[in-house]
Amino acid sequence: MHRNRLLIAAITGAVTMLAACGGDSKQAASPPNNGQPTAAVTPTPGPQATATGTATVIDWTRLEKYIPADKDLPDRVSYQSKIDLSNEAAANDQAQLKQFQDSGRLGGIQFFFSVEAGARTISVGVSYYNNPAEPKKLLRESGDPANPSGQGRFTVAGLGDEHVAQRGTLGSGEAAVGLILIGWTRGPFFVSLADLGGTASTSPDAAIKLAQLVDERIKAAPRP
């Protein structure tokens, strides 16, 4: 599995969680809209944006609505925390910040789930843009959505406008760690999911279900 941008973004989120950097302990028990059906997530009028550089931004907490409710989560999966992935929070330097701004990225959030009492971690990163072209471009840097026949590739029926799903391992021998990656676009959204900590034979079912739950919420509320 090559180190493409989807892989880097997803692993960065997982490593952040494992290092316990920036997690929101106040919301660790349950996500927003807990217990509410997906249909109850109502779109709000356009983003309340403020100017910054060459782009606009939205408050990252406006993306909390895409965190699945506890009652909908797969068995043995529990919500853990969320972190700010706004342009300023996610950028390592001014050049990267400018890249985010020039691409039309308006904001982002990363949220995390524990699988089987901490045996695995699933992270989901949601980025929101002012255009649908940039998410598609980003996805294609991870693989061709129209050609799911590559090594480790699999498909998730109906996910997003288009998606790339792949599984593989990090490291080798006894130190090898299983990794399941799913990236997709839905209009101006780019979403990356990383399931880290299993083995090469770990089922992708939990990752697939979480991806579907997040995508359902984006469809129900296409504007943060």
Image (cartoon, rainbow, N blue to C red):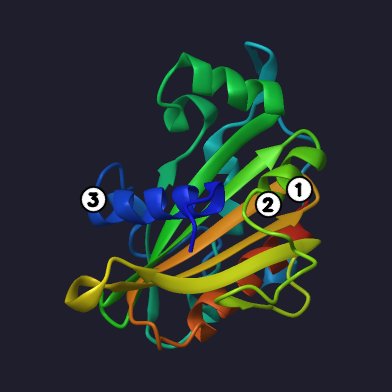
- Front: mark 3 or 1: 1
Q: Which residue is mark 3?
A: 20
Q: Position of residue 90 (x, y in %)?
A: 45, 33
- Front: mark 2 or 3: 2
Q: Quadrant of residue 134?
A: top right
Amino acid type of the residue tagged 1 in the rendering = Lys
Residue that appears at 27% across and 73% down: 176
Question: Residue 136, which numbered label?
Answer: 1
Which element type, helix, strand or loop, lies under badge 2? helix
User: Mark 3 or mark 1, which has the lower sequence index?
Assistant: 3
Q: Nearer the viewer, residue 150 or 116?
A: 150
Which element type, helix, strand or loop, lies under badge 1? helix
Which element type, helix, strand or loop, lies under badge 3? loop
Spatial distance from mark 2 to mark 1, Cα to Cα? 5 Å
> Label 3: few (<14), some or many (≥20) within 10 Å?
few
* Residue 49 in view (yes/no): no
Residue that appears at 69% across and 78% down: 156
Residue 189 located left or right of residue 65:
right
Amino acid type of the residue tagged 3 in the rendering = Ala
Q: Position of residue 43 (x, y in %)?
A: 77, 50
Taking 72 as reference, is 179 above or below it?
A: above
Question: Residue 139, which numbered label?
Answer: 2
